[in-house]
Amino acid sequence: MILTGAIHIYEDIEDINEGIIGILFILAGLGFFGALVLLYLGVNQPLLYGDGIIYTGIQFIAYFVLRWPDIIDPLGLFDKAVQALLILILVILYLQKRS
């Protein structure tokens, strides 16, 4: 979560002059850090994991939809790999907590 949050905040700094896109990057990055705070505070873990799967999944899909056909960006694709791994980990954690 820290890595993808940091990438989004870095991208915000790069895209600050692009209006709403820059704002969306900072909000996305802050969302990941907010989730870490909620996890630390002991918020219902299955709920947090499920929300994280949806939140990260939306960002994963949005990258390809909003950038198509120019999806080849090394940092962006690295972030999508990180997010895919995060979704996999969250699914595993969610299933473990639910059983």
Image: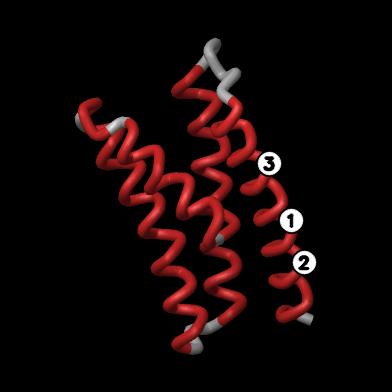
Q: Earlier in the sequence, mark 3 or mark 1?
A: 3
Which disc, if any, is residue 92?
2
Residue 35 higher or lower than 78, as above or below: below
The reply to whether callout 3 and callout 2 are in contact (CB within 8 Å) is no
For label 2, the SS is helix
Q: Which mark is residue 81?
A: 3
Foreground pick, 93 / 19: 19
Query: Which residue is painted at 74% across and 56% down in the image?
Result: 88
- According to the image, what is the colour scheme of the structure? secondary structure
Q: Residue at x 46, y 53 (%)?
A: 6
The x, y position of residue 46, in whole percent, is 61, 76
Mark 1 burial class by Cα count in 10 Å: few <14, some 14-19, many 20+ = few
Residue 58 place in picture, x, y as percent: 51, 43
Residue type highlighted by circle 1: Leu
Q: Is residue 2 above or below residue 45?
A: above
Q: Is residue 96 left or right of residue 64?
A: right
Dot 3 crowding, Cα within 10 Å, few <14, some 14–19, many 20+: some
